[in-house]
Image (cartoon, grey):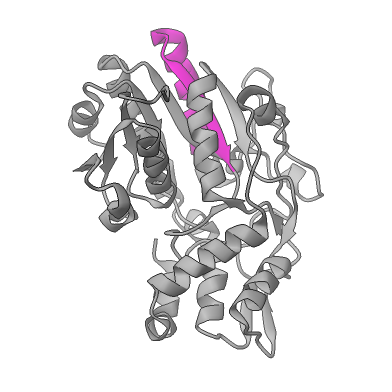
Amino acid sequence: MSEWSGERVLVTGGASFIGSHLVEDLVEHGADVRVADDLSSGEPVNLEAVQDDIELVEGNLKHYGFADKVTKNIDTVFHLAADHGGRGYISNYPANCASNMALDNIVYEAAAKNGVERITFASSACTYPTDIQQERQRLSEDMVSFEERGGAYADEVYGWAKLMGERSLQAYHEQYDIDASSVRIFTAYGPRENETHAIVAFMAKAYAEQDPFPIWGDGEQTRNFTYVKDITKALRLASENITDGTAVNAGISRYVTMNEAVEIIFDYLGWEPDEIDYLTDKPQGVRHRAADTSRAEELLGWEPEYTVEEGIKNTLDWYVEARDKEYVKENLEMLLHER
């Protein structure tokens, strides 16, 4: 029998892209799941497959009364709710991203008051210093330290907020003895993600046959694109195996350039543009990003199961089925920029 059987679980942001996949995973493992979401970027349709097995409660977790209500009679919280978007969003809306610090602490406080036993926090690769990501160097968790002077230097306000979310959770572990863990998510993608993120943005542009095809930067910047099912497995395993607030990376160790990612998409769609337009004045984020996952392997027995090729194929299958081609062509700019 699964250790999740009958476990009362709250997933904040559970109607979102990653959240909805996590909810499916937990339901499959026998958990009794409640979802709290303000539906600002999540959608109830994302939970269609499990809608009869879960409770969906709509509201704003920045309001203590709502956070208090949804954390009652809960054993485990997976805290994914956050104000976020792709690179353009976090560059343009720093104050929105800063509000995540309030959100995190309200959720933790309500959970502690209501006797929640464990909390797993969805953190981010944006917690890592940007200056060490100009060369190809896999990021390991000990590159961020709360103990050393100058031990932390995060990526934009969004990254600082995630780092503070980790540190606050450790504080709640220390004071209230709540089991705690954080998973630093590296460039997740997959079905149900919106077009403000790189992989699905590329898919939208290719599906709409945009030619010249625009790529932000010179296309040689790398990310370790990690398929959503691998991410949700890491979150679940972290909750099962880590109690002291330790953070673990969830990402692939392969460096994938933007140019390689779009080539995989072009090949699978059977379409190629005549010209690629490299937009070097657009926000590009760090130059290179890939994860050292040895800590996740050691503590969780986790390693990614999906290759980039498999993940992109699964995501494209979903995208082509879910989106009408003419609609994407007509609304491309809105899709690429709205959260």
Q: Is residue 184 magenta?
A: yes
Which quadrant would the C terminus be assigned to in this image? bottom left
Q: What residue lies at 66% left-to-right and 85% top-to-bottom? A: 272
Q: Residue furthest bottom?
A: 274
In this view, 305 is above or below 31: below
Q: Nearer the viewer, residue 266 or 61?
A: 266
Which quadrant would the N terminus be assigned to in this image? top left
Q: What residue lies at 70% left-to-right and 49% top-to-bottom? A: 289
Q: Is residue 332 magenta?
A: no
- In screen coordinates, is 279 left or right of 157? right
Question: Visible in this render: residue 81?
Answer: no
- In screen coordinates, is 228 left or right of 214? left
In this view, 268 is above or below 58: below
Q: What residue lies at 50% left-to-right and 74% top-to-bottom? A: 204
Instruction: Tell me the magenta residue range.
Output: 160-185
Q: Nearer the viewer, residue 219 or 92?
A: 219
Residue 308 lies, in percent from the top left, at: 66, 57
Q: Main secondary structure of the magenta part?
A: helix
